[in-house]
Image (cartoon, rainbow, N blue to C red):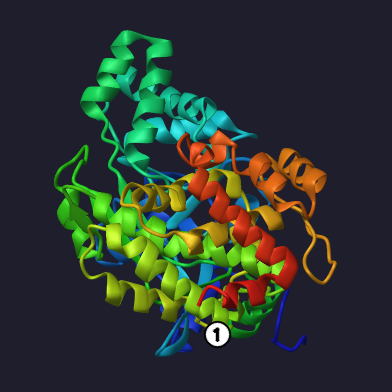
Amino acid sequence: MEACSLTDTFLSPADLPRLASQGLRVPAYPRSTLQPGVVHLGLGAFHRAHQAMVFDAMLAGGDTRWGIFGVAMRNPALADALAAQLGLYALQVASRNGVVWQVAGALLQTAVAAREPEKVISAIAAPATRWVTLTVTEKGYVPALADLLVQGLARRHAAGLAGLTVASCDNLTGNGRVLEALCLEAARRVSAGLAAWVQAHCKFPNSMVDRIVPAASPARLADARQTLGVPDAGALGTEGFTEWVLERRFADASDEAALASAGVTVVDDVRPFEDAKLRMLNGSHSAMAYIGAVAGLPTIAQCIAQPALHALVHGLMTYEIAPHLERQDWPAYRDALLARFANPELKHSVHQIANDGSKKILQRWTPPVHDLLQHGQRFERLAFAAAAWMRYCLARDEQGQTYVINDPLAEQLLALASTHAADAAATVQALGTLESVWGEELPRSAPWLASVTRQLERIHSHGMLKAAALLA
Ligand code: CS2
């Protein structure tokens, strides 16, 4: 007889009683009898550790309407691996209280939009479906996304079914309004009648979502295998903190109470939460990402452990971002963020956060610079972050290691940065004047461009960390 130890059979429902007896929290609700009530587009790590855990909590509380039909937009590997595990995957949650593992159960079925769009459209049009949620990243908000969604909505309209709540969960300012505008345009391309139905019966709440969820690493997967006794292709690590603030705009108004029971905050105006989160958390993240990538510091925790960078991020939030936030409790928010960045278990790669900078900067850095310019206030830390991004576009760190820039504008950015190399003024003229990256105002602001140039000169002559220390 073979010894019963680690096997190559992936995580499955048969493992749940054993894992429960080991003390892991596992789904205790009857998964096999559930029908999905949510179609989620974008099956990445963030969704599985954030919204999926809210739905998991609602299912655990006995509300059977929140099982997920999870759609990967292009990549079949993860969707198929999760399907083979019947949607089960494990989550390692690392907080100050220690590290605990749990198994998530809300994901019931998967599909791949690029491979089987019909399955996705039918899922959106299924009578049991009530919500669509999306994490398709900043660059995913394109007409093709709306066309897919609207095909599903058109079928609901034709079948006389109810409208849906369609909730964007991406880090975009006014994410619900952005998605609504795209969907209404797509619906108008079909017919005025469909557009009117979407407008009247589907709701697109703005939302602020927050949980730090690094992409799974080989080390995390090995850890999962050790803990679970079986491999888990979908295992993830995350922090204890999680927050979802949703605008009060639901196709079914009674959903508010159900969501609140799982810790979701429902408000009339998400804007103050969204501004604070995008500027303080994501803005600091992006700053550290480019500084760390160039200085050869691989993770956010390693960045924030550098005294010069801790001081820089603290000063960035205190003097350049927070003064123009509506959120009043910002000192506590800032200190909580500094502690979250330092979480040693997350090992959040700076290169992951550096991805798609040309789509992130406008959400994260441009708005606080606008506010500071308007009030005649100083912005050298934000200028330093901008200069770090420009230095990053050379695709080579200070140790001479090359890396890949993952960005829709990657080729253009690399070409512009390389042409001007160590000429800071020319680099800022080339990269700092791209309106698609910075918006309309900053490329025309002489004080802003001069400040970025000064910081980039310092980075070139002193090196990234010494230049950062000069800001203190
Ligand atoms: C990060 C975010 O990758 C990034 O750009 O800044 O994914 C961040 O971790 C989340 O928004 C935290 O809620």
Q: Residue at x 45, y 59 (%)?
A: 379
Total numbered badges shown on the rendered structure: 1
At which x and y percent is residue 200? 21, 24
Query: What's under tag 1, amino acid-wise?
Result: Pro
Query: Position of 457 compared to 206: left or right?
Result: right
| Mark 1 within 8 Å of ligand 1, using the beta carbon | no
User: In the image, is 234 to the left or to the right of 332?
Assistant: right
Q: Nearer the viewer, residue 140 or 320?
A: 320
From this view, report whether residue 467 is shown above or below residue 343.
above
**Which of the 4 image quadrants contains residue 152?**
top left
> In the rendering, at what x and y percent does residue 332 appear?
28, 77
In-image side of 7 versus 339 (left or right) = right
State which quadrant residue 460 falls in: bottom right
Nearer the observer, 335 or 434: 434
Q: Nearer the viewer, residue 14 or 56?
A: 56
| Residue 84 appears in the rendering | no
Locate the N terminus by quadrant.
bottom right
Q: Secondary structure under badge 1?
A: helix
What residue do we see at 68% from left, 51% from top?
77
Q: Is residue 259 left or right of residue 363?
A: left
**Would you place residue 373 above or below residue 298 in this image?**
above
In the displayed structure, 243 sits above or below 305; it is: above
Instruction: Report x, y in % for residue 166.
Output: 34, 38
Could you tell me residue 353's position as x and y percent? 59, 60
Q: Which of the two residues, 59 or 394, is positioned nearer the viewer here?
A: 394
For mark 1, what is the residue? 307
